[in-house]
Image (cartoon, rainbow, N blue to C red):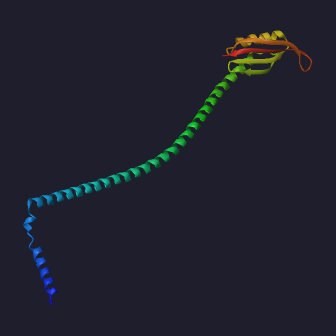
Amino acid sequence: MIKINLALKKSTVSSSNTSAISKIDTSALLSPAVRGIAISAAVYFGVGWYFDNQKNVLLQRVSQEIETLAQESKELKASLGKMKQYEEVKKALESDGKVIKTKLDTISLLSKERDAGIQYLRAISRAIPKEVWLTAVQFAPAEVIFRGQATEFNLVSDFTSQLSQTQLFLDVQQESAASTADEGGKSVVAFELKGRRK
């Protein structure tokens, strides 16, 4: 029987391995091929790191711009909301302005018509004979209609001619004249005259 001490052999092998690792030739690491590969790897990873860094910087700038634009968008929406309120107020004011302008125009027209009405009534009172009385006077935009009664036909003709001589009435014509009885049973002449206003 043969006995082999394995413990000694194992230690011998392990000690020879460590000396082999320590005896690796480092001059092989400095060879041009290894240096080229190392430089290429360094450039590749350096350029990759640089572009990743630039990408991150650009992404940060873009995200800041997005945040700025979002803030501006909120401010613009708030301003737009205020503008809509102002637009509603503006429309209401314009509507009120139109109503006020219409009222002022009406008041101005009525004021002019009031003065004209007084002048028309003065002219009628100067032209009417004593035994003629009016039951209605209608003023249309361009026309005047007189209705009334008189004691005689010639008084109606006198009234027609005197109205035509005033400066306020034109083309006064007798439309109708008929003999009727008044409420007391007396004979009167009912008439209607038409003319144009100046």
Q: Report the front residue among 182 and 8.
A: 8
Q: Is residue 39 above or below residue 10?
A: above
Residue 187 figure quarter: top right
Q: Report the front residue among 117 and 67.
A: 67
Count of marks placed on residues:
0
Which residue is rendered at x = 41% and y = 51% of the image?
70
Q: Quadrant of the N terminus?
A: bottom left
Q: Report the front residue among 51 and 67.
A: 51
Q: Would residue 58 be found to the left or right of residue 98 on screen?
A: left
List x then y, in percent, for residue 151.
85, 14
Q: Is residue 141 above or below residue 101?
A: above
Residue 122 figure quarter: top right
List x then y, in percent, for residue 147.
79, 18
Residue furthest front in the image? 1
Which residue is rendered at x = 7% and y = 66% of the image?
27
Q: Is residue 41 above or below residue 129?
A: below
Residue furthest bottom in the image? 1
Which residue is rendered at x = 8% and y = 73% of the image?
23
List x then y, in percent, for residue 93.
56, 39
Q: Would residue 131 be found to the left or right of residue 115 on screen?
A: right
Which residue is rendered at x = 46% and y = 47% of the image?
79
Q: Quadrant of the C terminus?
A: top right
